[in-house]
Amino acid sequence: MGVEALELQGLSIRLGGAQILHDVSLSVPAGSFTCLLGPSGCGKTTLLRSIAGFAPPASGDIRLGARSIAGLPPEKRGTAMVFQSYALWPHMTVAGNLTYPLKLRGIARAEREERAEQMLELLGLPGYGARKVGSLSGGQRQRIALGRALIIDPPILLLDEPLSNLDAAIRRNLRGELRRLQQRLGITTIMVTHDQEEALAMADTIVLMRAGQVVQVASPQDLYARPADLDAGRFLGVDNVVAARPDDPVAAATLGFRSMDARIRDTALEEAKGNALVRHGTVLDCAYTGGGYHLQLESGAEVISAVSGVPVAPGSQVCVAVPTASLMAFGTDQRLLPN
């Protein structure tokens, strides 16, 4: 079937009388890995389901390659979707689950079995065809659900938080495997996730969503370093927001930064002035986080989070220094200011 690009044009969706998506436009290049990222309820899963054909648009178009698929039922679109629950048949063998979509398409049994063996090799599970899915681990079930989607050779792969049911260590390993498999096959892939670390690690492009709209489309590096606005920054780990002062190294209404970039000093360093934001305060709390200490300090009316290589007793007077390069400047409208 080949690999194809996806184009969303002014897509809006209403469900139960409520507006879920608002005029969403997006271009997904052929062979790319795109993550739809955002908090629960932002519309990312509805958008994925609309591409698959399970949520019909109220307006707009969905184009796969040169053709519109907005009016087609799911089975006519050629897309393949992996659900959060995996949706495997417990009474079937691994091979039976893998080949079921081929059986529905009238593929002969010999070819189905051959393709199942090829898919198991690709998934790193050779010889697993005769097993029941109930005997598999969570990570193995995830691979079989992925293989069942890929076995029909779809032009686009849709993933609805496929790793969310797995333990953290397994999830980290499998996201690397999934990314390498996607790159090896070259298949256009769109994945929904609420986990920013997962999106940053896997995607070519991240689509940040909020309240049914696209807030920002960017590479992982650009999105992390330059979120579109203050709310996007907070979602992406900007856990410090302070009012700017005239002597700060960056002119803005508000300055944001991550605690990992804020270093505690026992005295203000003169050499930091002009090259860093400096704030004085009183330590409220000091907690060991493995490899260092996370501190909170009170600086006037503001509470700042920072890190230290050594413990600092609550009540201590310290200062925090943040390099200018790590500061994000926001205007009065909370939009990120240009460099």
Image (cartoon, grey):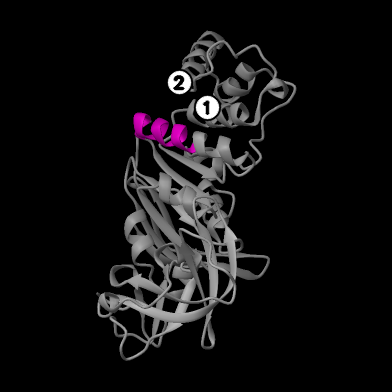
Q: Name the residue rendered at 46%, 68% in the picture.
A: 238
> Residue 71: where, in percent of width, then height?
50, 51
Question: Between residues 257 and 309, which one lies in front from this camera angle?
Answer: 309
Q: Work out whether residue 162 can be spotted.
A: yes
Give the residues drawn in magenta, as a range: 175-186
**Above or below for 36 versus 314:** above
Q: Amino acid at mark 2?
A: Leu
As helix, strand or loop, the secondary structure at mark 1 comes to helix
Question: Between residues 61 and 236, which one lies in front from this camera angle?
Answer: 236
Image quadrant assignment for residue 273: bottom left
- State the mark number for residue 164: none
> Residue 68: where, in percent of width, then height?
40, 50
> Residue 288: where, in percent of width, then height?
57, 56
Question: Between residues 238 and 146, which one lies in front from this camera angle?
Answer: 238
As helix, strand or loop, the secondary structure at mark 2 comes to helix
Relative placement, left or right, of 163 versus 237 is right
- State the mark number for residue 147: 1
